[in-house]
Amino acid sequence: MKQLFLISLVFLIFGCATHKPQFEGILFEKHTTLDETGFRQDELDSLTSYIKNNLTTTGMLVLKDGKILFEYGDIQDISYLASCRKSILSILYGKYVENGTIDLNQSIGEIGIEEDKGLLEIEKSATVDHIINSRSGVFHQPANRGYDENNILERGSVKPGEYFVYNNWDYNVAGHIFEKKSGKNIYKELEEQLAIPLGFQDWNIKKQKKQHRKSKSRYPAYHMYISVRDMAKIGQLMLNKGKWNGKQIISKNWIEKITTTVTPTEVINKRKGLTETSPFQFSYGYMWWMVDNIKHNPDFEGAYTASGYGGQYLTIIPKINMVIAHKHKLPTLVRWGLKRGNDVTDWQYWELLNKHIGTKKE
């Protein structure tokens, strides 16, 4: 019976793989010369060699000054974003926060958030703001895996806003609140706010799929499936402070808000077992990670990133006007938590950037 379930699951998921891109997008320009890019061809060749020999990267695109500087692997494949979905949702929130449709100070109890086995009154006092920076203090089990289970506390033990923990319950509820308050489907909104105006080349709304597990939680995970080159367009929009082709697509103020530290580096270091001497350190904002390793590489001053399980990254480095979109395509069974994959780890990815992207090339 279990084998039949797994076979059916694989066919169900791979059955969606036949969907082609929904509409024709707009190509990125490419650098025709490396003059004034700050890179030499031998450095880019070394980057290619490093990836081949050390990582299991399936696709990577580097934009410099809005043009393609480097590409590796399959940048067109529409694949799983893992937790990068959360950073994209944070972008979509801006429109509705600024027009007053979503009130960040409204409590989840007032909105009607509840679970089958109930939420505590202290948990219901958490605000939307607490939810989207993962400080709600609600330690309810989420519908999907991939959260910081080691730092989940006893329910009711802290007040909302006091304690950060990377909890998918918060993020999944953030998706539900977005849809309930805006009256819009997340995927349709992603299409209208980002895919169409940015000219996604590989977007297909039929590829998007939520993961429900009502035995754990009422609120599903809103998984997203986007190609490397379309991820890079989102990154370039962020680098441009929400502007695209001279038009303000997302508010500059909102972009700055969601990429501002809420949970400081020392808290994240403690959770990750890092120290002040670790070359890769981060703080956390509104579903984006801020890079804090400028002592080791000054190019990363002001940089921030979306990060997803297994090797999914979208990194913006304003100081050198650069965007990096990186993917490691996870096998279907790995995504469903049925076996481990040969992931690209955080350490490998940031080591790659530190050695081959920043000015401190060791």
Image (spheres, rainbow, N blue to C red):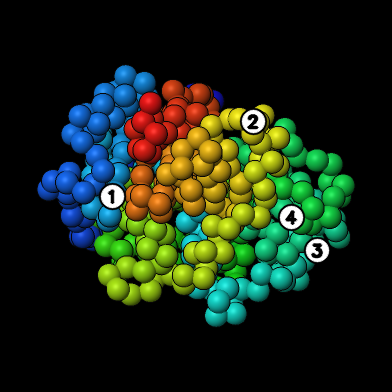
Given contact means CB atoms under 8 Å apart, are the residues at marks 1 and 2 in contact? no
Q: Residue at x 55, y 60 (%)?
A: 258
Cα–Cα span, label 3 and label 2: 32 Å
Q: Amino acid at mark 2?
A: Leu
Q: Which residue is mark 1?
A: 64
Horizontal side of residue 157 vs 12, given as left or right: right
Q: Nearer the viewer, residue 71 or 291?
A: 291
Closer to viewer: mark 2 or mark 4: 2
Horizontal side of residue 262 vs 231, given as left or right: right
Horizontal side of residue 243 vs 211, given as left or right: left
Q: Which residue is mark 3?
A: 125
Mark found first going from the N terminus, 1 or 2: 1
Cα–Cα span, label 1 and label 3: 44 Å
Q: Which residue is mark 4?
A: 136
Across and down, in percent, residue 124 comes to 80, 61
Local SS, label 4: loop
Q: From where the camera sits, is residue 8 visible?
A: no
Cα–Cα span, label 2 and label 4: 24 Å
Q: Which residue is mark 2?
A: 274
Mark found first going from the N terminus, 1 or 4: 1
Q: Nearer the viewer, residue 155 or 302?
A: 302
Mark found first going from the N terminus, 4 or 3: 3
Local SS, label 2: loop
Cα–Cα span, label 4 and label 3: 9 Å
